[in-house]
Image: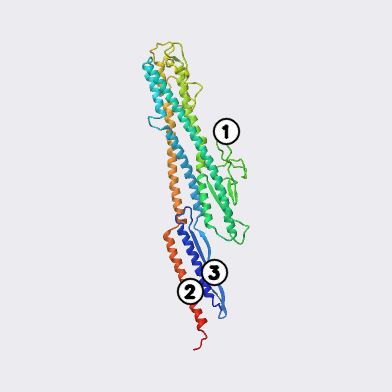
Amino acid sequence: MHSTFFGLELARRALESQQYALDVTGHNIANANTQGYTRQVANLKSTTPDTINSLGHSLSIGTGVTLENITRARDAFVDRQFRWETSKQEYWGGRQDALQKVEGMFNEPSENSLHDDMNKFWTAWSDLSKNPENMGARSVVHERALTLVDSFHHLAQQITDMRNNMDANVRVQIHQINSYSEQIAGLNEQIKRAEVAGDNPNDLRDKRDALVDELSKIVSVRVVETIDPSFTDREVHNYQVNIGAETTPPQILVSNTTAYKLSETAVDANGFALVQWDASAPNPGAALDMGDRLGSLQANMEIRDDYLPNFLQKFLDDLAAGIVQAVNTLHTSGEGLTAGVTGNFFDPASTTAATIALDPYVDDLSHIATRPSGAEIGDGSVAQQISSLANGWTAVASPLPNAATSFGDFYGANIAQLGIDVQQADRMKAGEDVLVTHLSNQRESLSGVSLDEEMTNLVRFQKSYSAAARVVTMMDDMLDTIVNRMGVTR
């Protein structure tokens, strides 16, 4: 026969469980606008039934309800896809931002650009060819040349400054990765300690997931979570974070409570930061394989180490060297107002965008060559040949690579390629924005807090709580009858 107080115990369990469920619902409502919060679910289950004998056979009778656990509404597959696409989005976003800055340096098309300065330089030579003896025209050529030189210097300095800025960004991101690894390892320790004690620390898990989400913006991330076989009577997890390309063995940043780090002191020959593991890692000194177009760190590294140096050397330096070579070749073939005196227009030893300079020989404006050696002073054929360099190589062999037909053609081709690169980054960034937004909405639909749903749960659990309270009242009436009324004779 059941205990007289069995019904009260059953009702107590119901009250307790519904109260817990109400608390979880209230926690969800309180964190409806908390960034990174995952909706929690109170999972109720029936308790182990009792066995009673009735008319010679055994029957099972329920003993009520209990709170089995509180879980997070989370989908590991969606998380993995979201972080993967976030890494791609940040890569193209970083590349887009950097290339737009490079595009802004050249300010094309406008009257304040290197192309415009080149055109004015050639035009000044053309005007001089028409009046070779005019000192004003000679002064204009000299000033236009100085302006062109300054434009080369300014662009070279801007690219150098941008490389240094990208290097500073790389150093900050290396430090951020190391900081995230330490924080994740610390949370792993807290979470594992709680799991060993039989708890399910959902809020700590949210903090850890938020850190992994932030890490995925810098570098590609994969989480490997497995059951710890050391514990057979409870569920305790091992948590590992791999970064970069999917290599064998994996590139482990965090393994349970152990945080590995990237070196914050390693530099290359230029003094730029290297992305490689420090002495704490299993493979110290090895470079981090960042994969293919993943994370803002890789975008910064590629712009700093590949795109900007190539742009400077294979475009601006080649252009500056070509102008120096072509103009000097023609200039040394002629003479200025002083017969028999020849020299370079540009310094032949300074052939990069950062170093291009006028030869001191032409500081004397009368030395600017306009005529072939021995020709009359009024002959401007040399100046005309120099001005014609704007359109082709009729007077000299091509001083530029890639079979460029003129300085303008070479400049235009490189600026057009820059525009194509910017357009590609814009297009890829826009595509990744759509994918990340879709995955974010998908994750939010599962993990986010819906106030309408939580209000419904409040009513549901409150009604169940009220019903359980009525059971207590009913059992109290029954016990009152048994204690105070049964066996009383009138």
Residue 39 position in % (x across, y down): 48, 58
As displayed, is residue 109 above or below residue 368?
Answer: below
Identified by mark 3, the residue type is Thr
2 or 1: tag closer to the N-terminus: 1
The mark closer to the camera, 3 or 1, is 1
In the rendered view, would you say 42 is above or below 6?
Answer: above
Foreground residue, 140 or 239?
Answer: 140
Count the labels in the image.
3
In percent of width and height, residue 471 lies at 48, 74
- Colour approach in the figure: rainbow
Q: Earlier in the sequence, mark 3 or mark 2?
A: 3
Q: Amino acid at mark 1?
A: Ala
Give the residue type at disc 2.
Val
Vertical comparison of 472 with 277: above or below: below
Mark closer to the observer (3, 2): 2
- Residue at image position (52%, 50%) is 211
Q: Name the residue beneath numbered marker 2.
A: 471
Q: Residues within 10 Å of mark 3 (few under 14, many from 20)?
A: some
- Check residue 269 in the rendering and tell me which mark sits there, or answer none: 1
Along the viewing direction, whichever of 58 and 106 lies nearer the viewer: 106
Q: Secondary structure at mark 2?
A: helix
Q: Which residue is mark 3?
A: 47
**Quadrant of residue 178 in the image?**
top right
Left or right: 281 as drawn, with respect to 209: right
Disc 3, SS = loop
Q: Which residue is nearer to you in this view: 427 or 279?
A: 279
> CA gap, disc 3 to disc 2?
18 Å
Among the two numbered marks 3 and 1 on one chain, the one whose residue lies closer to the N terminus:
3
Res. 471 visible in picture? yes
Q: Position of residue 105 (x, y in %)?
A: 43, 33
Q: Position of residue 202 (x, y in %)?
A: 52, 57
Does residue 408 appear to the left or right of 292 in the view shown? left
